[in-house]
Image (cartoon, rainbow, N blue to C red):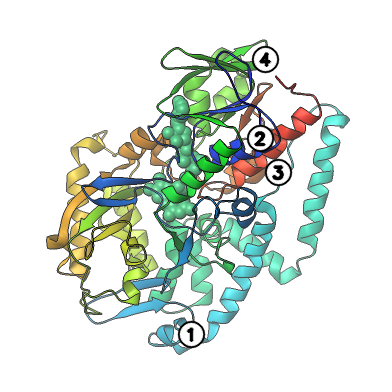
Amino acid sequence: MRTVTERQTRDAVIVGGGHNGLVTACYLAAAGLRVTVLERRPVVGGAAVTEEFHPGFRNSVAAYTVSLLNPKIIRDLDLARNGLRIVARQLANFLPLDEMHYLKLGAGKTAAEVAKFSAADAGRLDAYAQRLDAVADVLRDLVLETPPNVTSGSWAAALPELLSGARLGKRLSRLDLPMRRELLSLFGGSAGDYLDGWFESAPIKAAYGFDGIVGNYASPYAPGSAYVLLHHVFGEVNGKKGAWGHAIGGMGAITQAMAKTAAERGVEIRIASPVREVTTARGRVTGVVTEAGESFPARCVVSNLNPKLLYGSLIEPGALPPDFRERITRWRCGSGTFRMNVALSELPDFRCLPGRSPAEHHTAGIIMAPSLAYMERAYLDAKAHGWSREPIVEMLIPSTLDDSLAPPGRHVASLFCQHVAPELPDGASWDAHRETVADLMIELVTRHAPNFKAAVLGRQIFSPLDLERTFGLSGGDIFHGKLSLDQLFSARPMLGHGDYRGPLRGLYMCGSGTHPGGGVTGAPGHNAAREILRDFKRRRLRRA
Ligand SMILES: Cc1cc2nc3c(=O)[nH]c(=O)nc-3n(C[C@H](O)[C@H](O)[C@H](O)COP(=O)(O)OP(=O)(O)OC[C@H]3O[C@@H](n4cnc5c(N)ncnc54)[C@H](O)[C@@H]3O)c2cc1C
């Protein structure tokens, strides 16, 4: 392990200590590089953090549930030894529909539950799961790969990319024709059309379709929403594919474990150190300067930021190629997400499934949106009005699985609400409407569980503007950029830069604005580190 002293040139400075920045730092340091992470906030973890939001009540304040975190990364970074423990929910999902009816999804239960609404749908569940899982396997295979980069220029540069493209082609050619058709539907089509093709009853389509609009400001019938659905199923919990679980201690337990590993490997982590500028000279980066005016010379600079934020705010525009500079301003960002944390005196008592004592449905992802049509209306309403007056809320009550988050007998809940407009249509500020919209979300839950409103002891609210201000998420985009076909794989964040290398020598990207995109996966950080280490090996970068 090599330690860094003041003024010494680092091998790598990482701008941003989100989970991906930490993952990159861990891999680079394991290879013997001198690495410094500079994080703007007083805590590392980015959108994956646990904080006290009300006296005595802690929660995962932004990202709130785990599935996508890659098992190889968990192993390579020894996260379990550093305190990470992930537990499964007792029930995957619970959809309160009206005063009488609900749907539960969970191992051994889903078929009987769906049969309450359609026997035909119950009979199709296994085939659907198998088909989706087979396509998700394709994605799982690609998650830790660097996409083939689209290059121009010499054969020497193009050849490795052609080979990588050929390897990808070979992989896809192993799929039979029906599977390739499925792949096309899921990559190009809408979640709504896809689910309508499989099922006839509304509740199961709503349960599955919710994944298509998470963080995606769109109707479930918008082309591309099927990919967003797929993006949410490539994970696993403790080996169970597609499941979602809870990190004991909240999402911050993941990033604190990463920070511990980083520190063990000699990474210098500085919190409350916002970077003001990435410095450049003659087409290559030379280091960074913080807001406080401190310089950090470095062989390479690795950005964990949304590409729009990096290129729009931290790099002198004249240093970037004109076409790149112009295109990156068109990088599409903006989730329809409004996020709340509430401290609760008691558990919600649902009209359709009464009871205030902890039960399996209290541990589930509780989706309040009964149909795809309802979700489409929510989007159209938000588009016209700024927020949907009949919104979509997923509520999770992690204190039912983890007693470290709230005082005994009390609870914390995450409210993950869609759809709100990232920017209000009349140019008004979200600051003027935050409380009104928060009240609306509480009212919606209270319609299903009448004791909810009175049980709220405290609340924390993040409008899209708050997500941007607090976490640096441009447009409140939870994925660092829309997961649309033109912003995925080799085109994330732009054709020619899908391999984690920026348009300046020595500049790399390791955040969710690179392949495979958003979510607490660690994959962009893992892949970026591999490319950086390759460049050190090829002596494109020299050790300090
Ligand atoms: C409300 C919400 C709910 C979500 N729910 C889930 C979920 O349940 N499960 C899931 O898997 N994913 C979820 N996501 C998505 C997931 O959290 C993100 O995609 C992921 O955390 C992004 O990780 P990252 O490391 O790429 O970037 P980030 O976490 O955004 O980290 C970037 C870091 O850079 C720092 N930074 C910014 N500017 C500077 C600067 N100038 N100088 C220094 N540092 C800077 C930021 O403070 C931040 O720490 C959610 C996201 C949000 C916002």
Q: Nearer the viewer, mark 2 or mark 4?
A: 2
Mark 3 / mark 1, whichever is N-terminal: 1
Pointer 3 and pointer 1: residues touching (CB < 8 Å)? no
Tell me: 493 left or right of 464: right
Identity, as a three-letter code, of the amino acid under mark 4: Gly
Task: Please give left or right for residue 490 compared with residue 293 in the image.
Answer: right
Could you give the CA–CA distance between mark 4 and mark 1, rounded to whole angstroms?
A: 59 Å
- Residue drawn at x 28%, y 74% as measured from the top left: 358
How much space separates mark 2 and mark 4, taking CA atoms?
A: 24 Å
Residue 409: x percent and y percent?
A: 21, 66
Which SS class for mark 3? loop
Q: CA distance from mark 3 to mark 1?
A: 39 Å
Give the residue at x 29% y 53%.
Answer: 381
Asked which secondary structure carries label 1, the reply is helix
Cα–Cα span, label 1 and label 2: 48 Å
**What residue is disc 1 on?**
122
Quick one: 74 or 176, which is closer to the camera? 74
Q: Is residue 446 above or below residue 544?
A: below
Q: Which comes sooner in the sequence, label 2 or label 4?
A: 2
* Coordinates of residue 85 in the picture (x, y in percent): 49, 59
Residue 48 position (above or below residue 322): below
Chain-order first, disc 4 or disc 1: 1
Residue kind at label 2, given as amino acid type: Leu
* Helix, strand or loop at mark 2: helix
Gap in angstroms between the C-alphas marked 3 and 2? 17 Å
- Of the 4 image quadrants, the one containing the N terminus is top right
| Residue 401 x %, y % | 36, 66
- Vertical arrangement, residue 432 with respect to residue 360, above or below: above
Mark 4, residue position: 283
> In this figure, which residue is indicated by the disc labeled 2?
28
Instruction: Tell me the CA gap for discs 4 and 3.
Output: 24 Å
Question: How crowded is the residue under tag 1: few (<14 C-alpha within 10 Å), some, or many (20+)?
Answer: some
